[in-house]
Image (cartoon, grey):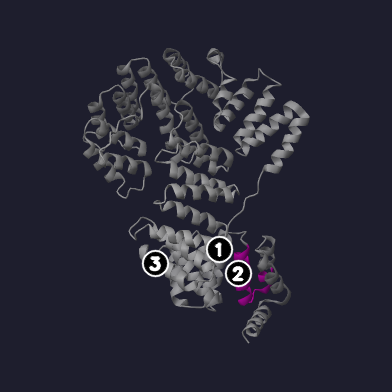
């Protein structure tokens, strides 16, 4: 079976009702609205309601902390700073307010004050963050030697490579590139390549020190296909002989921003979205304009369906940054997710005119149009993308698969089958392609043995996918092997219990094995899950006259149409 698109309902009505309550009931209404907005990940609305609540109770420390957290997550540090100040640091502020104060002190270059704050906050902050921040604060105060001691101390916590990375950054920022490169090389160990930013830092250090050839070698080793836009742009500059400098971290403030970026990236990989967003926002505050951070923030906010803030973060990426095309494509996806399809398409059209050589742009356009069931338009964009790519390009099978879907949905079966089989040539036994092609063949009553073999292979690879398991049950049903169809169809209904088509299919299978009461129960369940409009009369008719009579009726209608 083909997975259907799932539509989520909006919380806008609830928020609007709470807004009315807030207006009517002052403190309590605004507070409840703030809590609800926060629970719905609507950080900007939460911050607004907390701000209103504080106007009724300016001395409530916990309310201040909740408001500061909401302002940080929405990216409004100036508003957060309205509720905290350095003079309040010693007055027992909660942790988020203290971290905002510390970051503002670092941004202002008050290094000794920042060092004092870290000493006071040592028991409230993780040892890793404390060591990294203290190292950069000491660097800012002019004490590189003691800063390196702080970074080296991370080795005791089993995070020596993280400390070495920040040591290399500090040493490079102080002007000793040879020593920084030695640390990044890793000695007898592997190079310190934690992520793309650390790889870029290593390559830039080498380039500025007069060794662009080795910088190119590193980039080619970690990104042989040139899929990373920023590394690919750096490699082109190196090959063209352009002047490349190490400028990722030039000051202690840049270093502290990199601390927060590193932690945000780590937590993002651990799927801890709230903490990752908070640290990403601190990095953005300390060093605005980092494309990596704007993309990270945009992706996190997209996951939480906070679309307005996600779009705003992605739009902040500079047009001359190598990551700008990726940011714009992601922004287009965010706009599409929020229902602004025409705006999304316009963003991609403009980007396509700016960067006509990039295949990813027509792919993104095709994906959005396909999700909107504008299959004929989507096909054209997938074709345009394939004209820019060779068969050995990573994941080119996926474009053939997507174009095959678009062609199948526009009744171009021969072309669709060619795409599906091409996708399987490029990616043998790919389960989603096997399922789609196999299911289509079953529906057409063609090559049924081959279709069943492909679907069985897909089920073996993805046994927890209810839609693919449904395909197996339905293929067996189509082959008249009703008893065999029961087990996979029941399994599919367990895996995707509320899908109307799967419940409808299970009802058909039950009917054919003589379990007619259970069949009618499944058809009623299918109707309760709001099937597509054209399926409703069919299911109701089966409930009225039974499956055998319904199939005879359908067959008579098809015969009449062909006469």
Quarter of the image for residue 73 reads top right
Q: Which residue is mark 1?
A: 492
Mark sitting on residue 422: 3
For label 3, count other residues whose C-alpha is less than 10 Å away and answer few (under 14), some (14-19) or many (20+). Answer: some
Q: Secondary structure at mark 3?
A: helix
Q: Secondary structure at mark 1?
A: helix
Callout in the foreground (3, 1): 3
Give the residue displayed 55% in from the left and 61% down from the top.
3
- Mark earlier in primary sequence (2, 1): 1
Q: Is residue 511 left or right of residue 380?
A: right
Quarter of the image for residue 520 reads bottom right
Quarter of the image for residue 540 reads bottom right
Give the residue displayed 43% in from the left and 67% down from the top.
419
Outermost bottom residue:
563
For label 2, count other residues whose C-alpha is less than 10 Å away and answer few (under 14), some (14-19) or many (20+). Answer: many
Count of numbered circles on the image: 3
Q: Magenta residues? A: 500-520
- Mark earlier in primary sequence (3, 2): 3
Where 19 falls versus 326 (above or below)?
above
> Circles 3 and 2: CB distance less than 8 Å?
no
Q: Which residue is mark 2?
A: 505
Q: Quadrant of the C terminus?
A: bottom right
> Circles 2 and 1: CB distance less than 8 Å?
yes
Q: CA distance from mark 3 to mark 1?
A: 28 Å
> Circles 3 and 1: CB distance less than 8 Å?
no
- Mark earlier in primary sequence (3, 1): 3
Is residue 63 or residue 26 the one in the foreground?
26
Please state the horizontal and vertical placement of residue 195, each as a whole percent of the image: 36, 39
Q: Secondary structure at mark 2?
A: helix
């Amino acid at each position: 079976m083909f997975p259907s698109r799932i539509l989520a309902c909006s919380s806008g009505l609830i928020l609007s009702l709470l807004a009315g309550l807030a207006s009517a009931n002052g403190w309590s209404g605004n507070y409840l609205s703030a809590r609800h907005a926060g629970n719905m990940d609507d950080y900007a609305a939460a911050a607004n309601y907390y701000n209103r609540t504080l106007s009724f109770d300016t001395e409530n420390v916990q309310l201040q902390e909740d408001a500061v957290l909401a302002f940080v997550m929405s990216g409004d540090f100036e508003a957060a700073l309205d509720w905290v100040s350095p003079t309040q640091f010693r007055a027992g502020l909660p942790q988020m307010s203290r971290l905002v104060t510390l970051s503002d002190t670092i941004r202002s270059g008050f290094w000794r004050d920042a060092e004092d704050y870290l000493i006071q906050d040592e028991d409230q902050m993780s040892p890793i963050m404390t060591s990294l921040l203290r190292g950069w604060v000491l660097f800012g105060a002019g004490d590189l030697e003691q800063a390196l001691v702080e970074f080296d101390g991370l080795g005791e916590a089993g995070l020596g490579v993280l400390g070495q990375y920040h040591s290399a950054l500090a040493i490079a920022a102080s002007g000793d590139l040879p020593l920084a490169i030695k640390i990044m090389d890793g000695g007898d160990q592997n190079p310190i390549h934690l992520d793309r930013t650390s790889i870029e830092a290593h390559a830039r250090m080498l380039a500025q020190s007069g060794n662009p050839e080795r910088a190119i070698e590193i980039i080619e080793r970690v990104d042989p296909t040139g899929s990373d836009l920023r590394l690919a742009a750096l490699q082109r500059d190196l090959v063209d002989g352009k002047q490349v400098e190490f400028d990722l971290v030039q000051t202690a403030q840049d270093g502290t921003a990199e601390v927060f970026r590193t932690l945000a990236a780590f937590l993002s990989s651990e799927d801890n979205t709230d903490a990752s967003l908070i640290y990403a926002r601190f990095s953005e505050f300390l060093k605005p304009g980092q494309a990596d951070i704007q993309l990270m923030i945009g992706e996190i906010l997209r996951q939480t369906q906070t679309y307005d803030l996600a779009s705003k973060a992605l739009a902040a990426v500079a047009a001359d940054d190598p990551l700008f095309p990726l940011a714009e494509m992601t922004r287009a996806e965010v706009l599409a997710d929020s229902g602004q399809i025409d705006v999304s398409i316009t963003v991609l059209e403009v980007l396509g005119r700016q960067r006509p050589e990039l295949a990813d742009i027509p792919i993104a356009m095709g994906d959005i149009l396909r999700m909107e069931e504008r299959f004929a338009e989507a096909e054209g964009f997938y074709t345009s993308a394939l004209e820019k790519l060779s068969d050995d390009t990573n994941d080119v099978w996926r474009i053939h698969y997507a174009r095959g879907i678009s062609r199948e949905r526009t009744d171009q079966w021969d072309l669709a089958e060619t795409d599906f089989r091409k996708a399987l040539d490029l990616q043998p036994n790919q389960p989603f392609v096997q399922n789609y092609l196999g299911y289509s063949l079953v529906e057409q009553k063609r090559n049924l043995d081959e279709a069943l073999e492909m679907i069985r292979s897909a089920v073996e690879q993805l046994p927890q996918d209810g839609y693919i398991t449904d395909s197996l049950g339905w293929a067996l049903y189509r082959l008249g092997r009703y008893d065999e169809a029961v087990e996979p169809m029941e399994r599919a209904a367990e895996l995707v219990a509320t899908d109307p088509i799967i419940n409808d299919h299970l009802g058909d299978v039950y009917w054919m094995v003589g379990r007619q009461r259970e069949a009618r129960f499944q058809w009623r369940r299918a109707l309760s899950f709001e099937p597509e409009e054209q399926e409703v009369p069919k299911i109701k008719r089966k409930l009225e006259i039974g499956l055998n009579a319904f199939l005879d009726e359908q067959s008579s209608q098809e015969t009449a149409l062909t006469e």
